[in-house]
Image (tube, rainbow, N blue to C red):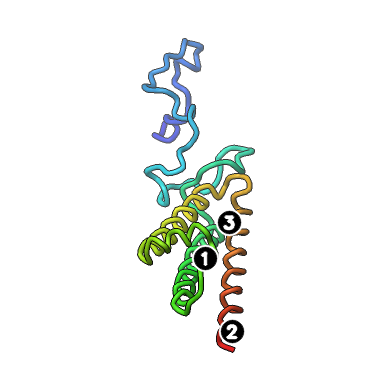
Amino acid sequence: MTQETRRHSPPEDVAAGAPVIDRRRGGDRRAQPTAPISRFFLFGRRIRGRRRGERSNLYVDRYTKSEWMLALGILVMSLTDLVLTLQYLDMGGEEANPFMRWALASGQDSFVTWKLALTLAGAVFLLVHARFRGVRFALTGLFAMYVALLGYHAVLRISLAG
């Protein structure tokens, strides 16, 4: 009998009908849901649910290319928005977002810090929860809103140049 066969076949006393003694220590690890960020985050093997019906509302260790592209696209467009906003402010423009206007009143460094921190935290939160109901839609919607915002920046630039 090979090691593989022994590992997967029941012990002889169980096959003969003897009582089974549970020798496991600790509680059942499956009793609690998987944590959003574990020691396997980004390096584990979970890319989807393992059981039938586990398609949504679950955490994974690895994300699809499209999930990464949406999250990274949001970050890149946020950085582009930041640079274009700072240039617009240097030309005498005003910040339209009331919260960011408050951060700007605290200084340009505060504005940049808040903008980057909020965007990074939001993008990471959405990426980690990408397999939850509605979150993929939120990621796609946020990506589309940033595309529209950059379109607004382009129109603003053209109108200021002309």
Tell me what residue is drawn at x 53 percent, y 56 percent: 64
Q: Real-space Cα distance between discs 1 and 2?
A: 24 Å
Query: In this rendering, is residue 154 above or below 67?
Result: below
| Image spot of residue 51 (x, y percent) | 58, 37
Residue projecting furthest to the bottom: 162
Residue designated by label 2: 158
All told, the count of numbered labels is 3
Mark 1 / mark 2, whichever is N-terminal: 1
| Image spot of residue 161 (x, y percent) | 56, 87
Looking at the rendered image, the disc whose residue lies closer to the viewer, 3 or 2, is 2
Q: Real-space Cα distance between discs 3 and 2?
A: 29 Å
Q: Which mark is residue 73?
A: 1
Locate the C terminus by quadrant: bottom right
| Image spot of residue 110 (x, y percent) | 37, 61
Residue designated by label 3: 139
Tell me what residue is drawn at x 61 percent, y 79 percent: 155
Mark 3 / mark 2, whichever is N-terminal: 3
Circles 3 and 2: CB atoms closer than 8 Å? no
> For the residue labelled by badge 2, is the local secondary structure a helix, a strand or a loop?
helix
Mark 1 / mark 3, whichever is N-terminal: 1
| The one of 46 and 67 positioned closer to us in this rendering | 67
Q: Real-space Cα distance between discs 1 and 3?
A: 10 Å
The crowd level at tag 1 (other Cα within 10 Å; few <14, some 14-19, many 20+) is: some
The picture quadrant where one finds residue 111 is: bottom left
Locate the N terminus by quadrant: top left
| Image spot of residue 144 (x, y percent) | 62, 64
> For the residue labelled by badge 1, is the local secondary structure a helix, a strand or a loop?
helix
Query: In this rendering, is residue 51 above or below 135?
Result: above
| The one of 36 and 153 positioned closer to us in this rendering | 153
Three-letter code for the amino acid on which mark 3 is drawn = Leu
Three-letter code for the amino acid on which mark 1 is drawn = Gly
